[in-house]
Amino acid sequence: MTYETDFLVIGSGISGLSFALKAARLGRVTLVTKKKRVDSATNLAQGGIAAVLANEDSFEAHVRDTLVSGAGLCHEEVVRMVVRNGPERIAELVQLGIRFAEDREHPGQLDLGREGGHSTRRIVHACDFTGREIERGLLERAAENPAITMLEDHLAVDLLVGSRAGVSANSESCLGAYVMAPDNTISPYLAKVTMLCTGGAGKVYLYTTNPDIATGDGVAMAFRAGAQVANLEFVQFHPTCLFHPRAKNFLISEAVRGEGGRLIDERGRAFMTSYDPRGDLATRDAVARAIDAEMKKSGDDCVYLDITHKSLEFLQQRFPNIYGKCLSLGIDMARDPIPVVPAAHYLCGGVVTDVMGRTNIAGLYALGETSSTGLHGGNRLASNSLLEGVVFAHQAYAQCEQDWPRLAKRSHPTAPPWATDGARRMEECVLISYNWDQIRRLMWNYVGIVRTDKRLALARERMGVLLAEIRRHYQEYLLTPDLVELRNIAQVADLIIQCAITRKESRGLHYMADYPAKDDAHFLRDTILSRR
């Protein structure tokens, strides 16, 4: 069966939901999400959204902080557009019912936090569960909108491009996607506009703060369809993931350091000023490398984040989620330093878009962590991610609104059904789990926080073998969600390795032990890959 809609939105985070709510003014919106609608990186975001709202702050200061963090690769015109749009987008979220924390001393004003890399307080938050509050509000508004259909447990398998449907052979366009239903049947979903909002690819690595859905689906699908991808070597490792055998993917927000938390080793020694003059408020790349170096020198399994100098009342009010989680594991952060380690957190590269969110394939947009807009450069500034998501959702909507008189008249082509070609059921799921584990360990050990030419060459060689085996599985067996995700993480892992091999310097999140310095003469540019 073929399904038709006006807008196909793949992903239910802040980007997808923000766009869907606006696009519903123009036509029918079908939003597909591969798990439950709340399963998104947005839902796990603790810190907040960076925006210039204080009198002592300025657009220029936010722009400058972003450019410094991006290590010379940010597109300044994009940075300025996003920063200037911040206050208006925050106001929209408030109008939609998002309950941000208010300043106790100034009723009616939002409370503003500070995080690493920011020169002043500008983080709008809902204590330490900002993402959950944003997700709640946007999902409630979407559920109320009759023009929006939300399909849970529906996994996009591949984009439906014009040449496959027998149209636009000379100028490729995206006509929708093939989507797997909960019973594993795959159907074409035709759309006039397709939005990739699938989040990042943290599950490519062994240790990550990301939810299990973060398998790089949008990047992999777009690349296979012929879209350009860029800067995938810049994988942000969050410095402070909770280190505990019963804690999975739990992030200790950067806001803890923003409120005075200090990183110490097992002997209680504060070490960040030995690595960066900004100390504990250095950017994430600097802090993650410092922790990695300390752990390698000492042989310790973790370092500690100490905020015991703050009162119990303050910690319970400012960080209720983190305080409760730590306490459930026997860690009272008012008395005990929190054990932390770096973990893969954010993909700064992605599918290349313009300032309106458009890719090089007509009809295909990419938003949020799936995209490479030019905002983040070589290292994302804390709390600029949710900002990017909501700003570019608005940009994409503005473009669609402009194009709608033309798009509304366009009829859907006939789409070929998904072909199984005699594929059989996979009886041994160990084929998937083994390869998944191999990829994640390979990426963690060889393409992690510190890289070398030798490790990257070995990683590329071994990924070639794994990719060939996974392609055979894809051709021989009926698809399951696990096999689709395995194919995607293998694709994205290989792209990360290719980008990392290309950039023979150290910049931002990409640190090469063989080339420890920046090389502006040769690498002050984006790393762009394309199948074409």
Image: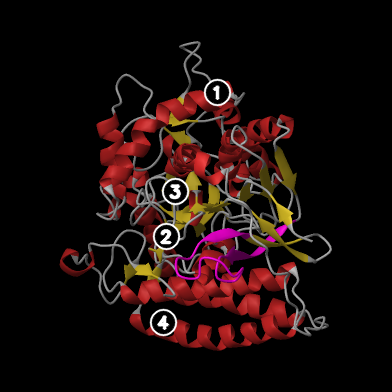
Measured Cα–Cα span from mark 4 to mark 3: 35 Å
* Mark 3: secondary structure: loop
Q: Nearer the viewer, residue 231 or 382?
A: 231
Measured Cα–Cα span from mark 4 to mark 2: 33 Å
Residue holding disc 3: 357
The amino acid on which the numbered mark 3 sits, given as a three-letter code, is: Gly
* Mark 1: secondary structure: helix
Measured Cα–Cα span from mark 2 to mark 1: 34 Å
Q: Nearer the viewer, mark 4 or mark 3?
A: 3
Residue 292 screen position, x and y as percent: 42, 63
* Mark 2: secondary structure: loop
**Count of numbered marks:** 4
Residue holding disc 4: 455
What residue is drawn where x is 25% and y is 33%?
60
Quadrant of the rendered structure where residue 399 is? top left
Which numbered disc, 2 or 1, marks the residue that appears first in the sequence? 1
* Extent of the magenta region: 154-176
